[in-house]
Amino acid sequence: MEYRRRAEQSVSLLTVLAVWMVATMVLANDPSLPTPPQVLTSLVDAATGGYFWSEVTLSTFRVYLSYVIAVVVGIPLGLLIGRSELVEDLLFPSLEVLRPIPPIAWFPALTIILFSPENIVRFIIFLAAFFPILLNTIEGVHDVEEEYAQAASSLGASASQSLRHVVLPGALPSIYTGLVNAMGLAWVSLVAAEVLSSSGLGYFIWNAFTAGEYPNVVVGMITVGVLGYTSSVLVRWLGAQQLPWLQSAT
């Protein structure tokens, strides 16, 4: 069964490659669409240089740091809002007003508030990851039957014990979904933020585009895709360690 799934996943990737190759044949007179061999050559050239790897390291650090901060802030805040009507009334309306604003739209205001381009990039990535984590945590808490917490209280559990041993475990599946979505959105927001900060993989892609180095544009896109996929796999694996029953049910 596992081998069959791997084969099917390989077919998916090979299909994308085949479509790409056909597109380059159809648009053979258009030099702006690089062929797979051209991209492979550019990838090898980039991989043998220190500049490319420094940009990869910088972008990965930015995403993971901002993501961890979003987790540390989003989950506890979601638990509080989900469990307390007072906290929900005080905080949730303001958060809902801020949520539809695209993270990149904060850039002009952040240049005044935070000054440092590095802090601006990190904050934009943080915002992209924060709201999926927050909303899924709140939804997970609301999905936990109130009777469970009441039963724990009747058995002598304190409010903090009920939160830790009843509410949090019950909300974990929803939180886990939010964590996976947040990681993907963190990488999506990275490229736009780095174009404006003049560093990282986002700037690598934009700089290659303005210089007419179209194979390097694809190299940067593929690199972001691979890093984002690997990061999501890591989050899924960590979630599977905490929620093994979900994996056995699929």
Image (cartoon, helix red, strand yellow):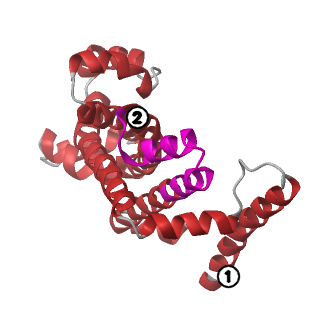
Q: Earlier in the sequence, mark 1 or mark 2?
A: 1
Residue 1 higher or lower than 243, as above or below = below
Query: What separation in Å lies between label 1 and label 2 (alpha carbons)?
Result: 39 Å
Q: Is residue 160 left or right of residue 239?
A: left
x and y percentages locating residue 191 in the rendered image: 46, 41
Q: Amino acid at mark 2?
A: Ala
Query: How many labels sit on residues?
Result: 2
Q: Quadrant of the N terminus?
A: bottom right
| Label 1 element class | helix
Viewer-proximal residue among 95 and 231: 231
Q: Residue at x 11, y 42 (%)?
A: 158
Answer whether residue 8 is magenta in the image.
no
- Residue 62, above or below 15: above
Q: Which residue is mark 2?
A: 193
The residue that mark 1 highlights is: 4
- Where are the magenta residues, as a range? 197-223
Q: Residue at x 54, y 58 (%)?
A: 219
Q: Nearer the viewer, residue 164 or 12?
A: 12
